[in-house]
Image (tube, rainbow, N blue to C red):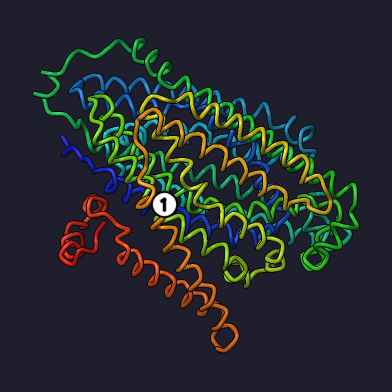
């Protein structure tokens, strides 16, 4: 029997944050050379395939991970250990069924989505390649939700890193082999996979969907590695309960009753997930269709706006809308960076709040809510603002050495907009998870419907305007985030009676973030004007200077609480030292 592992809220979140950062870094290391290899057009096909995969995968699980995590944590708090084991067994069977169903659904939707909805037949190959991922991702989610309910975030964290590394290696490897083979065939026969090409630009255009499909096939194979780790981990760990605990534990429900409870628990989340993903799917379809319509309506205006980038990348007129959508997809990698990390706080909060709510421990609920939102703001405000004011140098650092560098001027304004909106987007996931933890799974459904409606309308109007085109997409996304967060936060306050401490949660981090952002901007500008260092060094110095100012001001205004520090690994020593000087809030 393995020793039972359990982490506190921020200790567990810290484990997930580390893994999320690693996964994001690996993702950037993957997508930068991938984008350079398959081009912005190939990246457009890649993103289009993910736009149908994501909703199908999410609907396949449809709230089950939240239900499993919540049921496990609640039964653990009540000492129902036999029921905990039963919950995992039932969950694994249900996830396998939904995984098979999701894979089948994605295969059925591949043709109508590619040929009819987005009018991009080449995307069909990419969807076929990614379909098996649904099954293995669902199976992994059963294991991850079980351990998260036990407040053990290590299996989730390690499996995510293993999966990301495998995806990177296999995705780039497969894409490179296909690109090399295709260009070799063109140079030898003048054709790409049997289709004649008039010149090298047309040959690359013919290769884009094939290389994107190869990259996605690598992603599918990579998901198997994450599942294998979790399966081996569970086998090695064995039972987490002692014989005495199981003997004294109440009898478990029948499998049918457990499944019914799981479905009932997940039903509101399921509804919200279906609504979210259907609206997200419709939104992505709307963006692609309206972008294509804008290009068709006034190609001259589009080419005037992006002529240099389109010419430098060798993009054909027929590929312009896919090219711009590929640029938007590259920006989304950065847009989701901070929210992905802060989402781990919400995941870690589920078992903590669920257990506290089950035993009516209002003090623990209050402490957790304040701690989660404050930590999100401490991370999201400086990171998002710095991303906004340094968007262009960041993108040039990432893509400067590749043939996709010309997209930077198109991408930078979108990244700036997302940067300033990062705090809103970063707090959305944690607030949603906390609402689910206290049983208000109906609230996200309402907020998502309102936000998604506004987003789709905004995309239809703005993206379809040739003068605005792809720049309208971030506007709709930001409006959606604002509506969702403010509505859900108001409902969380009403349900729990916990009003976040405005001063410590919002005002102090905001002030420190503004000062650090100003430092970053001024430092980079002055170094660029008067120094002879490479831009990458200037950017690094600017970020370090901003971080130093931010941390110094946080201590000065007592923006960090001792309670938060103590919940972090090894935080007790830091808390004692700062308390000695009266520097904690």
Q: Is residue 117 left or right of residue 259?
A: right
- Residue 208 makes an appearance in the image: no
Q: Position of residue 245 (x, y in %)?
A: 12, 24
Q: Residue at x 55, y 35 (%)?
A: 132
Question: Residue 142 location in percent, x, y?
Answer: 39, 30
Relative to 395, is 173 above or below? above
SS class of the residue under badge 1? helix
The front one of 509 and 236 is: 509
Of residues 276 and 367, the one nearer the viewer is: 367
Residue depicted at 56% across the width and 48% down the height: 218
Q: What residue is shown at x 51% (from left), y 58% (from top)?
A: 384
Q: Position of residue 225 (x, y in %)?
A: 43, 44
- Where residue 74 sits in the image (x, y, percent)? 27, 25
Quarter placement of the N terminus: top left
* Residue at screen point 45% across, 68% down: 516
Query: Is 440 above or below relative to 147?
Result: above
Choose top left, top right, bottom left or bottom right for residue 578.
bottom left
The answer to whether 259 appears left or right of 72 in the picture is: right
The C terminus sits in image quarter: bottom left
Residue ID for mark 1: 506
**Residue 200, image quadrant:** bottom right
Residue 87 seen in render: yes
Residue found farthest to the left: 244
């Amino acid at each position: 029997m393995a020793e039972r592992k359990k982490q506190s809220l921020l200790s567990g979140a810290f484990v997930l944050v580390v893994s999320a950062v690693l996964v994001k870094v690996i993702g950037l290391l993957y997508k930068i050379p991938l984008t350079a290899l398959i081009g912005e057009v190939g990246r457009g096909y890649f993103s289009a395939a993910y736009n149908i995969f994501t909703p199908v995968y999410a609907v396949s699980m449809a709230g089950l991970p939240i239900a499993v995590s919540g049921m496990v944590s609640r039964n653990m708090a009540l000492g129902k250990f036999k029921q905990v084991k039963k919950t995992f067994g039932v969950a694994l069977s249900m996830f396998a069924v939904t995984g098979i169903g999701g894979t089948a659904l994605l295969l059925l939707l591949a043709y109508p989505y590619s040929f009819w909805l987005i009018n991009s037949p080449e995307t069909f190959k990419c969807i076929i390649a990614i379909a098996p991922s649904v099954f293995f991702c669902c199976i992994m989610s059963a294991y991850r939700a079980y351990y998260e309910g036990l407040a053990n975030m290590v299996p989730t964290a390690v499996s995510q890193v293993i999966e990301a590394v495998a995806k990177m290696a296999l995705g780039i490897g497969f894409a490179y082999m296909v690109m090399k083979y295709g260009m070799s065939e063109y140079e030898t026969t003048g054709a790409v996979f049997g289709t004649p090409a008039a010149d090298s630009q047309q040959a690359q255009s013919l290769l884009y969907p094939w290389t994107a499909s190869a990259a996605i096939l690598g992603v599918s194979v990579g998901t198997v590695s994450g599942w294998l780790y979790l399966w081996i981990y569970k086998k090695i760990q064995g039972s987490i309960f002692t014989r005495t605990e199981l003997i004294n534990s109440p009898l478990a429900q029948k499998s049918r009753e457990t499944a019914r409870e799981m479905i009932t628990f997940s039903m509101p989340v399921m509804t919200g997930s279906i609504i979210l993903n259907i609206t997200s799917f419709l939104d992505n379809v709307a963006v692609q269709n309206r972008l294509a319509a804008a290009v068709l309506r006034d190609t001259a205006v589009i080419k005037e706006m992006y002529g240099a980038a389109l010419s430098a990348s060798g993009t054909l007129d027929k590929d312009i809308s896919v090219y711009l959508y590929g640029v938007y997809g590259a920006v989304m990698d950065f847009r989701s960076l901070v929210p992905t990390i802060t989402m781990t706080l919400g995941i870690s909060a589920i078992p903590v709040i669920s257990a506290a709510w089950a035993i009516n421990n209002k003090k623990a609920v209050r402490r957790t809510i304040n701690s989660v939102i404050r930590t999100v703001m401490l991370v999201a405000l400086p990171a998002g603002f710095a991303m906004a004011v340094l968007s262009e140098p960041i993108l040039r650092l990432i893509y400067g050495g590749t043939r996709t560098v010309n997209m930077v001027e198109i991408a930078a304004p979108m990244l700036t907009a997302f940067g300033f909106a990062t705090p809103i987007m970063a707090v959305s996931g944690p607030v949603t998870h906390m609402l689910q933890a206290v049983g208000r799974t109906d609230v996200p459904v309402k907020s998502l419907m309102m936000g998604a409606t506004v987003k789709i309308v905004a995309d239809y109007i703005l993206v379809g305007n040739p003068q605005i085109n792809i720049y309208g997409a971030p506007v709709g996304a930001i409006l959606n985030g604002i509506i969702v967060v403010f509505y859900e936060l108001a409902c969380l306050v009403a349900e729990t009676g916990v009003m976040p401490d405005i001063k410590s949660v919002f005002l102090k981090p905001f002030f420190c973030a503004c000062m650090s952002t100003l430092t970053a901007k001024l430092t980079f500008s002055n170094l660029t004007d008067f120094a002879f260092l490479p831009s990458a060094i200037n950017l690094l110095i600017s970020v370090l200077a901003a971080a130093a100012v931010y941390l110094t001001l946080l201590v000065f205004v007592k923006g960090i609480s001792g309670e938060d520090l103590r919940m972090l690994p090894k935080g007790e020593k830091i808390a004692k030292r700062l308390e000695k000087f009266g520097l904690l809030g």
